[in-house]
Image (tube, rainbow, N blue to C red):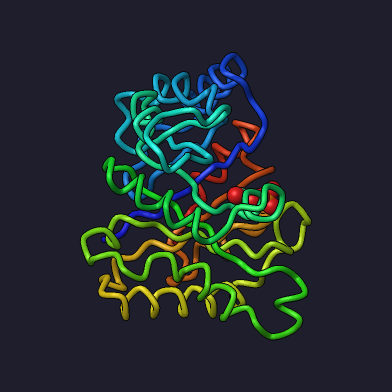
Amino acid sequence: MKRLIFAANWKMHLGPEAARGYMETFLARVPLLDDREAWFFPAAVALHAVAEAARGRGDLAVGAQNVHWEEKGAFTGEVSAPMILDAGATAALVGHSERRHVFGETDAETGRKVRSLLAHGLTPVLCVGEKLEQREAGVTLSVVGRHLGVLEDLDARALAKVVIAYEPVWAIGTGKTATPADAVEVHAFIRDFMGREGADPGQTRILYGGSVKPDNIADLVGESEIDGVLVGGASLDPVTWGTMVQTPLD
Ligand code: 13P
């Protein structure tokens, strides 16, 4: 039985001190989750603080928002897979739309990051998704297919470790959410891709992200195609996020 993943991407918010306070409030409100997991993606400087706060709770996990593909070296401003592992991370986002569209990250770079994470036993959360003009032009699935292409030569064992997050760019931070039906269509396409590559499609975990809020989360996680959510803005308040993580499932 797959456990749903409720993932919080804090983006460039909450330093170590604020993160400790956040976790204190969250932990006081959220008892051990037995049918789901809550994952936190803090800024790199707060990774260790969040990992320490989550220590001993098997239902919680911590990951980085980005990683460099090299292990070490003269790459000013970057952090590597071994470094985030040392800080307590078990996962990292890769190819988030802000990395792709604000920082110009390419599919080739995304692919190298996925491989570096896998080489260190970390879970890559590969983010994929189309821009508004691409959706309107009817090329959503080919864009998502291109983003997924970085997984093409991975074996079944590696693919089993990868989590995919479908985040339509036009729904991120805009208040516009894909309808559950829109999300389901793309999730089914992703699941089919993973199956063709040799993964067990039933075990592949595919999250939806983009303006997930307290008032739409139940409809999204109620879809059997949707294995969890990746949430930005609404995850920044520990009380709101604590409630969202405990969304009742039918
Ligand atoms: P919002 O939930 O703020 O739309 O952000 C989504 C996102 O980018 C999560 O990675």
Residue drawn at x 75%, y 71% as measured from the top left: 132
The vertical placement of 32 against 28, above or below, is below
Judge whether residue 213 can be spotted in this image: no
Judge whether residue 130 can be spotted in this image: yes
The vertical placement of 178 against 78, above or below, is below
Where's the N terminus, which quadrant? bottom left
Q: Nearer the viewer, residue 208 or 155?
A: 155
The vertical placement of 85 against 218, above or below, is above
Q: Residue furthest front?
A: 74
Could you tell me residue 23's position as x and y percent?
51, 24
Residue drawn at x 67%, y 33% as measured from the top left: 12
The vertical placement of 136 against 225, above or below, is below
Q: In terms of image quadrants, where is residue 163?
A: bottom left
Residue drawn at x 51%, y 19% as measured from the top left: 24
Could you tell me residue 236's position as x and y percent?
65, 35
Residue drawn at x 65%, y 69% as measured from the top left: 130
Q: Nearer the viewer, residue 226 or 109?
A: 109
Where's the C terminus, which quadrant? bottom left
